[in-house]
């Protein structure tokens, strides 16, 4: 049969259109380089020195920088198109970027940041939110989102970001990589846009602890030497209580790793809230001013408030003239905070600064030269893209409280990945006193492999226990089914009880137990079991039929009819549901 030429042209057109749409969609989904880069470029290192001199320490490594670092010939965009339009290209490259290039690394681009580097979500409506390579439906974390994504996606060996209130630590945690926030003032900020001058630090990301350490030695201008081991590992127990996942998922991994490397005697537990109450007296004054002393608030949550006030105040001070002159369209939450900060008094700001100084002294006193403080990086798993969770007071208070410890004290902190929970990255943070950056880098290198091994062991043991319990539960259910067939109703219920104790998330176990209860005339128990089954599985037809029967026997006729009708929706040909609904409607449907 001959084909119609017109039809062939239509088919050809549809095919080409399909290819075009597929290609367009494919590109959109992939988003070149996961949307991490805002500018591609290349800064090449100098030639290698002639032997016998050693090669450059960062030879062969590539890196990217957040769009806060000046690179000669490029506008530093600050995450906002209006900033880019109103500023000239940089005339010099920032000191930290130049240092890395001279150290042998190749810079390949500038990466996306949050709008004005202000948030910790990693979302940017102007340039697009970089895709979290580990969990694309979740935020990558910010402000240095693109820099973290570039490392997590293996696009570069390491990258630079700025950590003010968590700008390196949070995206490292959310993207499952290592992030280092050095001691305040340890790394030059010449040629780096200021966000909050008393909190800003230049930090970096890597996947490999050896690369993290190599970069650190170049930036900190310290020679390689013998590694120092910690003499005490302090677990901040109250900080771990802020976690929204099981505490053991992180705490036990650190405990086991510490015991394996240094022995149990090094481990110490501390209630940080109690310690800070005695060491940071200005916190009490701040608390009384904010709540009139009427509401009990933990030190950690108060510190979150102090850090945020300093952050907003200094940001406004740095950029108020530009904001007032350009009047850029800002993200609503940012805009509201800019207006709110104008109401702060000088006395409140001075009090916040006093707390910052007392925090430095308190943490240094706690850790001395050889201590490590262990805290969760954030309280939450990475929130979903566009989710409102990150704006909630609880999220802000708990997450910023944990981040404030290093930000306010000026101490160094490293975020270390510990695998996954519910398919999302989890991490832990290690903090050392101000100036102990090399010691902290050495500790990470020592503990990293064991931390990963212990995280994997923990997950496997939990998974093994879960599988074992689920198998035992299935065996108990089968025994219950056999007893039911033999009309041994009470014995069947005993077996179903055992199955539910082993696995209380299986709808079938509740539904089967309900059937046995019906045979014994225990209609209330049967109704309750069926409701549990339906809560676990909205499409469990047997549970609707059995609950309908139980409700009929209890005299809840209207509810029984609804159950039988819903069973029919799920299975339109179910004769039992049809006959039961029809019978009840004929006898009791008056007024329904």
Image (cartoon, helix red, strand yellow):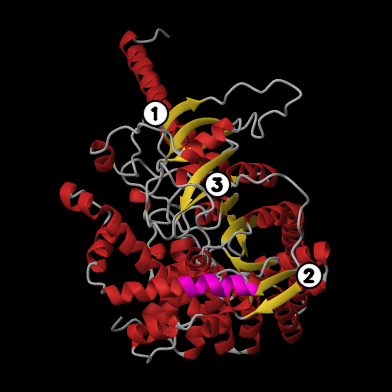
Q: Nearer the viewer, mark 2 or mark 3?
A: 3
- Label 3: few (<14), some (14–19) or many (≥20) C-alpha neighbours in 10 Å: many
* Magenta-span inclusion, residue 359: yes
* Magenta-span inclusion, residue 558: no
**Residue 101 drawn at (x, y percent):** 55, 31
Residue 10 image-quadrant placement: top left
For the image, the number of numbered tags is 3
Q: Residue at x 60, y 49 (%)?
A: 177
Compared with 506, 314 (above or below) is: above
Q: Residue at x 45, y 65 (%)?
A: 568
Q: Is residue 79 left or right of residue 574?
A: left
What SS does tag 3 mark? strand
User: Which of 194 and 34 lies nearest the eye of the viewer?
Assistant: 194
User: Which of 146 and 476 lies nearest the eye of the viewer?
Assistant: 146
The quadrant of the rendering that contains the N terminus is top left
Q: Which residue lies under the disc numbered 1?
A: 24
Compared with 248, 89 (above or below) is: above
What SS does tag 1 mark? helix
Compared with 231, 322 (above or below) is: above
Q: Which residue lies under the disc numbered 2?
A: 472
**Residue 184 drawn at (x, y percent):** 51, 58
- Label 2: few (<14), some (14–19) or many (≥20) C-alpha neighbours in 10 Å: some
Q: CA distance from mark 2 to mark 1?
A: 50 Å
Q: Earlier in the sequence, mark 2 or mark 3?
A: 3
Q: Nearer the viewer, mark 1 or mark 3?
A: 3
Q: Residue at x 77, y 63 (%)?
A: 257
Q: Nearer the viewer, mark 2 or mark 1?
A: 1
Q: Are marks 2 and 3 in contact (CB under 8 Å)?
A: no
Indicate which disc residue 204 carries.
3
Helix, strand or loop: magenta stretch: helix
**Residue 37 drawn at (x, y percent):** 44, 35
């Amino acid at each position: 049969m001959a084909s119609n030429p017109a039809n062939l042209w239509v088919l050809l057109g549809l095919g080409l259109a399909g290819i075009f749409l597929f290609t367009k969609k494919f590109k959109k989904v992939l988003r070149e380089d996961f949307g991490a880069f805002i500018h591609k470029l290349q800064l090449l290192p100098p030639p290698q020195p002639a032997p016998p001199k050693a090669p450059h320490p960062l030879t062969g490594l590539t890196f990217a920088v957040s769009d806060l670092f000046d690179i000669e010939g490029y506008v530093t965009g600050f995450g906002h198109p209006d900033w880019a339009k109103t500023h000239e290209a940089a005339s010099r490259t920032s000191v930290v970027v130049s240092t890395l290039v001279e150290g042998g690394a190749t810079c390949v681009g500038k990466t996306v940041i949050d709008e004005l580097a202000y948030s910790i979500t990693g979302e940017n409506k102007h340039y697009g939110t970089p895709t979290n390579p580990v969990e694309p439906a979740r935020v990558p974390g910010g402000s240095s989102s693109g820099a973290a994504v570039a490392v997590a996606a293996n696009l570069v060996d390491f990258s630079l970001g700025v950590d003010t209130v968590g700008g390196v630590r949070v995206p490292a945690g959310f993207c499952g990589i290592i992030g280092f926030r050095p001691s305040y003032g340890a790394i030059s900020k010449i040629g780096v846009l200021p966000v909050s001058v008393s909190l800003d630090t230049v930090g970096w990301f890597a996947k490999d602890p050896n690369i993290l350490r190599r970069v650190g030695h170049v930036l900190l201008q310290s020679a390689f030497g013998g590694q120092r081991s910690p003499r005490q590992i302090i677990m901040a127990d109250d900080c771990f209580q802020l976690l929204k996942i099981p505490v053991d998922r992180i705490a036990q991994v650190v405990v086991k790793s510490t015991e394996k490397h240094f022995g149990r005697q090094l481990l110490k537990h501390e209630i940080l809230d109690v310690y800070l109450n005695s060491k940071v007296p200005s916190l009490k004054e701040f608390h009384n001013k904010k709540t009139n002393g009427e509401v009990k608030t933990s030190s950690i949550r108060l510190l979150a408030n102090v850090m945020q006030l300093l952050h907003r105040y200094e940001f406004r001070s740095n950029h108020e003239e530009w904001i007032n002159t350009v009047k850029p369209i800002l993200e609503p939450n940012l805009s509201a905070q800019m207006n709110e900060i104008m109401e702060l008094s000088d006395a409140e700001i001075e009090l916040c600064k006093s707390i910052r100084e007392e925090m430095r002294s308190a943490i240094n006193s706690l850790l001395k030269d050889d201590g490590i403080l262990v805290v969760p990086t954030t309280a939450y798993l990475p929130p979903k893209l566009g989710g409102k969770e990150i704006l909630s007071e609880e999220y802000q208070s708990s997450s910023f409280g944990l981040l404030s410890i290093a930000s306010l004290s000026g101490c160094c902190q490293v975020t270390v990945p510990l695998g996954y929970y519910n398919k999302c990255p989890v991490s832990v943070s290690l903090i050392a006193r101000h100036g102990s950056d090399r010691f902290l880098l050495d500790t990470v290198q020592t503990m990293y492999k064991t931390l990963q091994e212990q995280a994997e062991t923990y997950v496997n043991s939990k998974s093994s226990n879960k599988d074992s319990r689920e198998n035992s539960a299935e065996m108990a259910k089968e025994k219950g089914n056999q007893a039911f067939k033999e009309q041994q109703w009470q014995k069947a219920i005993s077996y179903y009880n055992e199955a539910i104790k082993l696995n209380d998330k299986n709808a079938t176990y509740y539904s089967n137990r309900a059937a046995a209860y019906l045979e014994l005339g225990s209609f209330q128990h049967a109704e309750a079991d069926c409701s549990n089954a339906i809560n676990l599985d909205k499409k469990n037809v047997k549970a609707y039929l059995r609950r309908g029967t139980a409700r009929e026997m209890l005299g809840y006729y209207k509810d029984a009819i609804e159950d039988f009708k819903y069973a029919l929706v799920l299975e339109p040909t179910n004769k039992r549901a049809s006959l039961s609904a029809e019978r009840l409607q004929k006898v009791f449907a008056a007024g329904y």
